[in-house]
Amino acid sequence: MPLGVNKLTYGADLEAKRLAIVGSEYDRVQGYSGDVGNYWILPDFFTYYYSSNKLPDSFVSLDICMGLYNDILVKALQSAGAKTILGYTDSVKVGYSGDIVESMTNDLLRGSTVGEAWMYATIAFGEVDPSNNLAYCMLEGDTNLTLPLDIINCSFEQALTTGWGEIGNTYQLDSLGSIMPQDGRKMALLTTTSDFNMYSLGLLVGNQGKITKTTDVPSNAVNLHFSYNALTDIGWDPKDFTRGNLWFRANLYDISGNLVAQPKMALLDQTSWQSLSDASTGYTYQTDWNDVAYDITSFRGQKITISFEVGWTWLNMGQFMWPGYNIGALADHVYLDYGQTNP
């Protein structure tokens, strides 16, 4: 905080050592080379102004040098109600701490615990700043803390990694031939490939494309909404395809990963298809956009994972070579309503 703010405003805080002035002329004489003429916030600032649990069940990231050099600042934040604190034991470079925070934020938005997000981040970037082997990245407090989640990036206007987990072949598109998004300027595409990844008892299961999002269901939520358009590159009426089955499905899972509901299952041979004359899409048939509203009242107060998936299952046991047909699906405009038809 710059010193341009009247010192009289913070006189009491300076006297009580809740704030300090750094970068004075005296500091310059003593060799201080940092920012000149700033206030620094000290631990007692949080103890004094954030008492009475004003940071309840919060996750605090101390993106500063030496935030966890000792436990003084941690205890001050915990006294204000903070549950988990991320910090560094010595001087840390902005590039390293920024990578850690960005990685953890993305995983927290996907439903990971703070401990899981920290683990993924430190596997990717290391537990110690590469430029300073004394600067350990550490967590203090409850590692099982999770963030209250809403469906962010519900129309895929940002990269799919923002709020969504991805498996297999997934893309963010602004159009697919003449097919345009249902909401905003972007939509998600998930596709299979002609490879397979499991062979068991004569049953081939094709590669899947999948995007997932974990969210809290508020106590007043009514319906889960989404739009989808399933696509296939089969060269004849998909309802006549008997050598396997391709599918798009929307599944709901609980926090243990158990399937608890299936708002939509579109099987290749049980779906209404339209011929797609636009060759630039790479597909021959589409279902066109379908809007789904699924009653979600039974999940109020719970955390669920929404999963959009495409895949194929080989059903003809007499043949062992997949002919190369695939299915794709566009997804868009995913949201919860509270008795309204549109957010």
Image: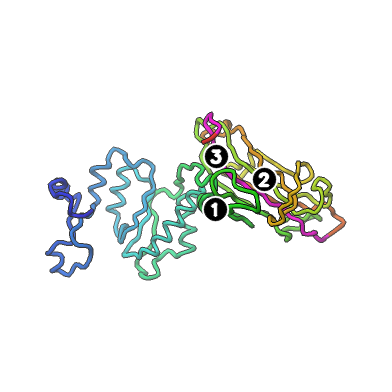
Q: Are marks 3 and 1 in contact (CB under 8 Å)?
A: no
Identify the residue at the far top of this view: 339
Q: Residue at x 65, y 38 (%)?
A: 263
Mark 2 lies on a secondary structure that is: strand
How far, Cα to Cα, is label 3 from label 1? 16 Å
State the SS at label 3.
strand
Task: Tell me if 78 is positioned left or right of 13 in this view.
Answer: right
Mark 1 — residue?
160
- Tell me the distance, in whole angstroms, between the alpha carbons under discs 2 and 3: 17 Å
Q: Earlier in the sequence, mark 2 or mark 3?
A: 2
Q: Position of residue 159 (x, y in %)?
A: 52, 54
> Image quadrant of residue 97?
bottom left
Give the amino acid at mark 1: Leu
Q: Is residue 298 above or below residue 65?
A: above
Q: Position of residue 128 (x, y in %)?
A: 40, 66
Which region shows up in magenta? 320-341
Q: Is residue 329 magenta?
A: yes
Identify the element where label 1 is drawn: loop
